[in-house]
Amino acid sequence: MPKSLISIHDFSKEEILHILEVAKDFERDKCRNILGDKVIACIFFEPSTRTRLSFETASNRLGARVIGFSDAGNTSISKGESLKDTIKMVSNYADLIVMRHPLEGSARYASEVSSVPIINAGDGANQHPTQTLLDLYSIQQTQGRLDGLRLNMVGDLKYGRTVHSLLQAMSHFSPEFIFTAPEELRMPKEYLEFLSERNIPYREETELSGNIKDTDILYMTRVQQERFTDPMEYEKVKDVYRLTASMLEGCKPNMKILHPLPRVSEIADDVDETPHAYYFKQAENGVYVRMAIIAYLLGKTNNL
Amino acid sequence: MSKLIDTSLQVSAIKNGTVVDHIPTDKLFKVIEILGLTSCDKQLTFGMNLDSKLYGKKAIIKISDRFFKDDELNKISLIAPYAKINIIRNYEVVEKKVLMLPESITGIAKCANPMCVTNHQRITPKFTVFTDKDSSVMLKCHYCEKVTNLKSAL
Ligand SMILES: [Zn+2]
């Protein structure tokens, strides 16, 4: 079985740091024709334009050619072909598969039947490891380091898979956490226990405004109405977790705001003009990090 | 004299083979399934609703001329943690085995996550087994990575 990237746990701390190093190199020099002889399949069983474009850009910048589909609607999958058969077929055509699928665990299963590396571009609510790696890259690029930082994660901490994976990945780097969330969307107990077992300090807050000044990274997420059992609860909290430029007064000069995008209303437009806004650059970073992951899984990063 | 008669004699003795005793009576058929005995060609006897000090009612299975690997037997501990395994040779108990929780299981439990790929495609579910702080047996799905209580997965 070739090495795949299905979950952030599949990469050791050393591998994570290696990917970030290589991504830095690709950011400096964006056009690297090192995969001119490769075909990369981007197979999206559910649409995600943002993620697909990022992977296709990364593949093209490495000189590879891209095949695939952007949703399963008009393919043989909609005619009932099994995931196994689709993966067997595509892995005979391509040298690497980027896959997004609505079912949880589908990417792990694909990596077991595929003869080529799989990159998980999201398997339902489960994992989205390339998002985590680009978050780490963005943190490192803005702070000059990963070690000893304080992160304030804000919004939907219960269902947000990006915050869960980032929390686990950051645990390698002695962080401190602030978790700012409404009562209904608090960080699940299992993740708090994960931190306690590793002696990683955290505190839980319900107000955003008073908890910005002492943080290095403000990681914002969407608070979605459908997550609330009581719509009134949503109405009560939605503005509490809305960040505006005036709230940034007195924050640390190095503080950067990250957001996995798309945003709805949790970051006001006037924040975009502040030196703390980093979310658009963060999305751009995704291309360099995905270039690094693709190149690494195809064994092309040792002599760069 | 009657004190010396083991309750297992409520089901006739075997000459050589394996006896699985102290199975909760409602788990009998699940144990038969887990041990793959539905397609066993050896002589198989079982009893259920037998008197038991431990459960009130228990079940027992005796399999002639069949000896199991430890990890086959350990699967039983998931549903019958107090089951007792006796290895019989020439009508005598020559070995008593202590069941240990297996590290992983394949194909016994179903993932409780409705969005798990194993519930939508022909995939054999796989789990790693561990006990949580309250020593309940928990299963972590190899595919969707969700953790479920053993009770809701069987
Ligand atoms: Zn599962």
Image: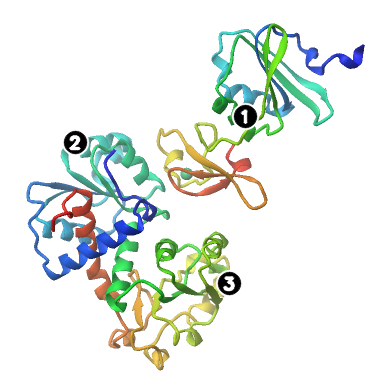
Tell me, yes or no, whether dots 3 and 2 are on the same chain: yes
Front residue (pair A160, A304): A304
Q: Amino acid at mark 2?
A: Asn
- Total numbered badges shown on the rendered structure: 3
Q: Viewer-nearest of labels 3 and 2?
A: 2
Q: Secondary structure at mark 3?
A: helix
Q: Is residue A6 above or below residue A205?
A: above
Asked if marks 1 and 2 fall on the same chain, the answer is no
Q: CA distance from mark 3 to mark 1?
A: 41 Å
Q: Is residue A287 visible?
A: no
> Is label 3 in contact with label 2 (beta carbons under 8 Å)?
no
Marks 3, 1: nearer the viewer: 1
Instruction: Identify the residue under disc 1.
Output: B76
Whole-number angstrom distance, CA of label 1 to CA of label 2: 41 Å
Query: Taking A99 as reference, is B127 left or right?
Result: right
Which residue is disc 2 drawn over?
Answer: A92
Asked if the residues shown at circle 3 and circle 1 are in contact, with their CB atoms under 8 angstroms apart, the answer is: no
Q: Residues within 10 Å of mark 3 (few under 14, many from 20)?
A: few
Where is residue A231 drawn, in percent x and y? Answer: 54, 71
Question: On screen, A160 above or below A277?
Answer: above
Select label 1 or label 2 by which is in front: 1
- The answer to whether residue A174 is above or below residue A268 is above
Please give the residue where the numbered disc 3 appears in the rendered image. A183
- Of the image marks 3 and 2, the number of the one nearer the N terminus: 2
Query: At 9% across and 60% down in the image, what residue appears?
Result: A32
- Quick one: quadrant of the C terminus of chain B? top right
Left or right: where B144 falls relative to A94: right
Q: Quadrant of the N terminus of chain B?
A: top right
Q: Is residue A113 left or right of residue A168?
A: left
- Circle 1 crowding by C-alpha within 10 Å: few under 14, some 14–19, many from 20: many
The residue that appears at 44% across and 72% down in the rendered structure is A175
